[in-house]
Image (spheres, rainbow, N blue to C red):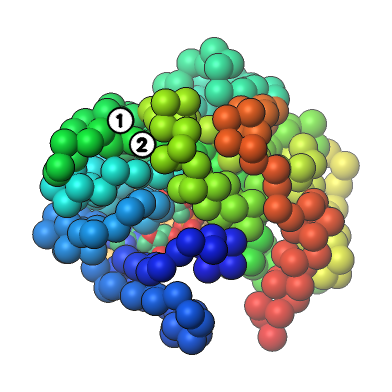
């Protein structure tokens, strides 16, 4: 997105624990693309990568709500890693920092209270018990508190945080997992979540586009945007997690069975709790981390949708991809990803 949309770009450094092979293809254009294999938990590696950069987009993170990684590892990558990025900016004199936060820093909370078409100012009890949202909330706080800190050379750091809702699009592994599961079940999926529960979703291309715009506008609009949070949103429809997935899986030949959940909520919660117990019992022997656990069930079962125009007001954001384009691109990816 940066290469396509930012004409003033001179160099793009990609710092990641795992470098993808597609990065090589980006090297053929006029902009210098520098892949750097590194770990955000290693302060010296981060500082070396950041040195001389005009703007840093910090999107690396450990996304785990399934119990694959330990809470300590999640903390180390998401919180300590973010602190390292901030310190690297301060030490090396980089003034603009964009952080990829998450809707999860707000909710859904452990009480299952709905957040219905809320915006950045909507009051909501953000109570976190799970390591992932806890770490994202802590990291976001660090980023916002760092706004205004003096960087090397004496000028102030300008930071802001973007909070995507559930991201979908090309590369969405869970979508592919549901597709494969549906194929195994005779081209069917069974409804587990009531259709009335709305879940916020945003297309990956629009998330990227919003990051590019923020990176571009942070300098001229530092006063307005510094220390701010923005939900990442677009025109994707409000639907339940499963009904939304069917927008893509339907055209790929799957159908969602049932107008109401096949199993009652209490039974699903029992199964989810059993999964959590099994995970704990089996941990010394193997990693058992299914999609269904008490936390994922609670998120999927709690309405959390965003309706805001803050990004449009502050930096002129309009989605780059329409809902129709986002849908088509995602369907093509699902179809292609399993061949
Ligand atoms: N997937 C979603 O629905 C949402 C994701 N987010 C946030 O967006 C960001 C990207 O998430 P996804 O693309 O979904 O996840 P992902 O797992 O596909 O991408 C995360 C990237 O961070 C890298 N990474 C992990 N640990 C690292 C380390 N120690 N050092 C350097 N790089 C490391 C990974 O190699 C990976 O390329 C994350 O910060 C996540 O919290 C926010 C809202 C929703
Ligand atoms: C895996 C969940 C759906 C399974 C439901 C079941 C077991 C009944 O079939 C996903 C439902 C909601 C997802 C999360 C949500 O989109 C918010 C997120 C934000 C992030 O920052 C990271 C990812 C996630 C936690 C996302 C993860 C998958 C779900 C829990």
**Of the residues under marks 2 and 1, which one precedes in the sequence?**
1
Query: Along the line of sight, which residue is nearer the eye, 319 or 30?
Result: 30
- Residue 13 at what x, y percent from top left? 35, 68
Q: Which residue is mark 2?
A: 159
CA–CA distance in space, label 2 to label 1? 5 Å
Q: Is residue 125 left or right of residue 171?
A: left
- Residue 129 at what x, y percent from top left? 37, 30
Q: Is residue 306 above or below residue 81?
A: above
For disc 1, the neighbor class at 10 Å (few under 14, some 14 to 19, many from 20) is many
Quadrant of the rendered image holding ligand 1:
bottom left
Q: Quadrant of the N terminus?
A: bottom right
- Residue 318 at what x, y percent from top left? 70, 43
Tag shown at residue 116: none
For image coordinates 38% across by 28% down, the residue present is 227
Query: Along the line of sight, which residue is nearer the eye, 111 or 225?
Result: 225
Q: Quadrant of the C terminus?
A: bottom right
For image coordinates 58% across by 16% down, the residue present is 122
Q: Is residue 170 above or below residue 339?
A: above
Q: Are marks 2 and 1 in contact (CB under 8 Å)?
A: yes
- Residue 201 at what x, y percent from top left? 66, 44
Q: Is residue 172 left or right of residue 287?
A: right
Q: Which residue is mark 1?
A: 147
User: Which quadrant of the view contains residue 254?
Assistant: bottom right
Q: Is residue 11 above or below residue 86?
A: below
Query: Along the line of sight, which residue is nearer the eye, 239 or 218?
Result: 218
- Asked which secondary structure carries label 2, the reply is strand
For image coordinates 39% across by 75% down, the residue present is 33
For image coordinates 77% across by 37% down, the residue present is 238
Q: Is residue 147 visible?
A: yes
């Amino acid at each position: 997105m940066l290469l396509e949309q930012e004409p003033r770009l001179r160099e793009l450094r990609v710092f990641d624990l795992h470098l993808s092979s597609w990065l090589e293809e980006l090297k053929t254009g006029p902009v210098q693309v520098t892949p750097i294999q590194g770990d955000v938990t290693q302060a010296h590696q981060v500082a070396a990568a950041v040195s001389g950069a005009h703007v840093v987009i910090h999107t690396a993170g450990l996304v785990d709500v399934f119990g694959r990684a330990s809470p300590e590892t999640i903390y180390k990558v998401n919180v300590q890693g973010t602190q390292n990025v901030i310190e690297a900016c301060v030490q090396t004199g980089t003034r603009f920092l964009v952080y990829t936060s998450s809707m999860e820093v707000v909710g859904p909370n452990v009480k299952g209270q709905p957040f219905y078409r809320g915006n950045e100012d909507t009051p909501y009890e953000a109570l976190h018990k799970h390591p992932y949202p806890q770490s994202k909330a802590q990291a976001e706080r660090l980023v916002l508190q760092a706004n205004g800190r003096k960087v090397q050379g004496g000028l102030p750091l300008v930071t802001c945080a973007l909070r995507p809702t559930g991201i979908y699009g090309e590369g969405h592994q869970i979508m592919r997992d549901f597709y494969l599961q549906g194929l195994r079940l005779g081209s069917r999926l069974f409804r587990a979540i009531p259709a009335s529960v709305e879940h916020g979703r945003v297309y990956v291309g629009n998330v990227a586009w919003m990051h590019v715009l923020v990176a571009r506008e942070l300098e001229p609009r530092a006063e307005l945007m510094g220390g701010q949070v923005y939900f990442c949103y677009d025109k994707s429809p409000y639907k339940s997690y499963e009904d939304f997935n069917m927008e893509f899986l339907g055209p790929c030949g799957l159908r969602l069975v049932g107008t109401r959940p096949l199993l009652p909520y209490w039974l699903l919660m029992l199964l989810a709790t059993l999964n959590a117990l099994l995970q704990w019992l089996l941990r010394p022997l193997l990693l058992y981390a299914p999609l269904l656990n008490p936390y994922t069930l609670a998120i999927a079962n709690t309405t959390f949708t965003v309706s805001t125009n803050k990004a449009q007001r502050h930096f002129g954001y309009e989605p780059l991809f329409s809902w129709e384009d986002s849908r088509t691109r995602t369907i093509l990816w699902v179809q292609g990803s399993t061949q």
